[in-house]
Image: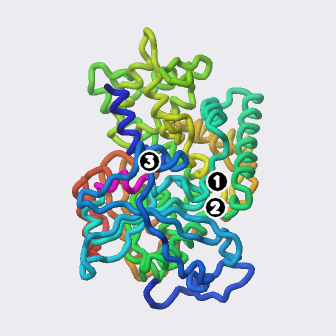
Amino acid sequence: MYRARLTAVLSVLALLPAAGCTAGGGPETVAETESPSASGPVATDQLPEELTGQQPDWSACPAPDSEQGDTGGSPSPLPDGATWECATMKAPVDYSDPGGDTLDLALIRARSTAGDDERIGSLLFNFGGPGGSGVATLPAFGSDYTELAGRYDLVSFDPRGVGASDGLVCLNGTQLDSYFAENLVPTDEAGEQDHLTRLRSFAAACESAAGPLLPHLTTVNTARDMDLMRHVLGDDKLHYFGISYGTQLGGVYAHLFPQRVGRAALDAVVDPTADARQGALAQAEGFQQALTAYMESCAQSEDCPLGGSPEEGERKLNDFLDGLRSTPLPTQDPDGRPLTESLAWSGIAQSLYSEDFWPFLTQGLEEAMAEEDPDGTILLTLGDSMNGRNPDGTYSTLQSSLVAINCADTDQRYEIADVHNALPEFTDASPVFGPGMAWSLLSCTDWPVTGAQAHPDVSTTTDATILLIGTTGDPATPYAGTTNMREALGEDKAVELTYEGEGHGAYNSGNSCVQDTVNAYLLDGKVPEDGKTCS
């Protein structure tokens, strides 16, 4: 029963990425009205007519392909009967050369049934990652946005390098199976070199797969894509709902196009002030906090596989993971894959994104830690979800795109010595997650593209008030990032809404207080009192 339910839940919930979206007139921003030059991007209204004059050919949506993530079929209509339409929009590969090569960005929308006097315009979604397919994810969660569909066209897209928008899959399914099964934490010098060699090979494969597109997979370019999207959709302002990495994308958009910001809700806020090391450390702390909350809940049951306290649970979990390094567990996987340390680690982390996963984590640990005939199938399934593996053994672009976009964005490159220096602090933050996250600092070390900068610039001069939503128990985008984003945006540019709960993202948790507050803001422009709390 648990395995059947788990497959059904993951087909929808796993689409949310693991930490881990004729224009009207009006003035453009200073950045938008700069004279075109070979050394910098041109403004949206200065792009060639073949880009600004596009009229997307909307038609019925097919089922998502393997690069977007297998959801099992074409998207179902919304509860009000509105159907999903799909199209593509051309965008420049390089905004400094807007007359050069283009790529096709995949779009999806459900048109609002409201009359012209009620319809506000388009509401553009980005669900994060970076690397998540908006074309697959928006309809999967469409029923959550029924009230918003009353006045908005619901719109999302596959960002450049993601899904059907020239999505990047660096290795084939068999190669990725091996890549994700390797142990996260080297135990000796030879293992450290093997770890670095594996990352170098992955980077080289990504360069080969992406070709000349690789340097242009930046958040800044995706923000520019969104402004072209706004123009092509016929909206004077960009109304936006960003989740997780989508909040960073929204902040960058507000920096580049302050006078085009409409109503913008940013949920599960990324800390724009943290560098790669600080961000990884904060996530180690966040996942540890979420793990403790799970273990406290589990301990209330007499048959909790982790015992009667978080302290006992942490010891048992570390012993279990240590054992998997040398002796992976058998599973019922049709391809014969065992449960390794890193796949179990990923499965546990995936389970902490939502309380909805906690029962599956408990069942998975019970089966994997059983004294007789241990079975790692459930934890393997959860780990596959984190890694973007489809049931047929192919992979979505989720993890490949995530690395490519992160490494194009950040200019920080770490060495093995940096990991050694960081390990004590990371291990102290989380004995379970810290060491693996410390070693993840090497992901961009030999990346073939020079990263853009240490921090995204989200400072803005917009007159709009941006709504920031933070969850106190969020593992992937810890709560402190909400206040840091507010300060980085600038004084009086945002208000904060706090959800006292567990999981990654507040709106899709189903909390009525959060949903009512966000809906009132997006639908009626009602800015909540700064510091409002929902629980």
Q: Position of residue 142 (x, y in %)?
A: 33, 56
Give the residue number, with chain letter if any, for mark 1: 404
What is the spatial separation of the Cα atoms under label 3 and label 1, in whole angstroms? 19 Å
Quadrant the N terminus occupies: top left
Of residues 207 and 512, the one nearer the viewer is: 207
Q: Position of residue 462 (x, y in %)?
A: 45, 80
Residue shown at the point (77%, 28%) measured from the top left: 190
Residue type pointed to by label 3: Leu
**Was residue 222 drawn as part of the magenta stretch in this picture?**
no
Can the viewer see residue 481? Answer: no
Of mark 3 and mark 1, the one earlier in the sequence is: 3
Residue shown at the point (75%, 49%) measured from the top left: 446
Mark 3 is surrounded, within 10 Å at the Cα level, by few (under 14), some (14 to 19) or many (20 or more) other residues, namely: many
Q: Secondary structure at mark 2?
A: loop
Of mark 2 and mark 1, the one earlier in the sequence is: 2
Of residues 466 and 263, the one nearer the viewer is: 263
Q: Position of residue 113 (x, y in %)?
A: 26, 70
Residue 418 - label: none
Residue 217 - label: 2
Q: Position of residue 206 (x, y in %)?
A: 70, 49
What is the spatial separation of the Cα atoms under label 2 and label 3, in whole angstroms? 21 Å
Can the viewer see residue 463? Answer: yes
Q: Secondary structure at mark 1?
A: helix
Residue type pointed to by label 2: Leu
**Extreme-top residue of the structure:** 372
2 and 1 marks in contact (CB < 8 Å):
yes
Give the residue number, with chain letter if any, for mark 3: 15
Q: Which residues are magenta?
A: 136-144
Of residues 21 and 70, the one nearer the viewer is: 70
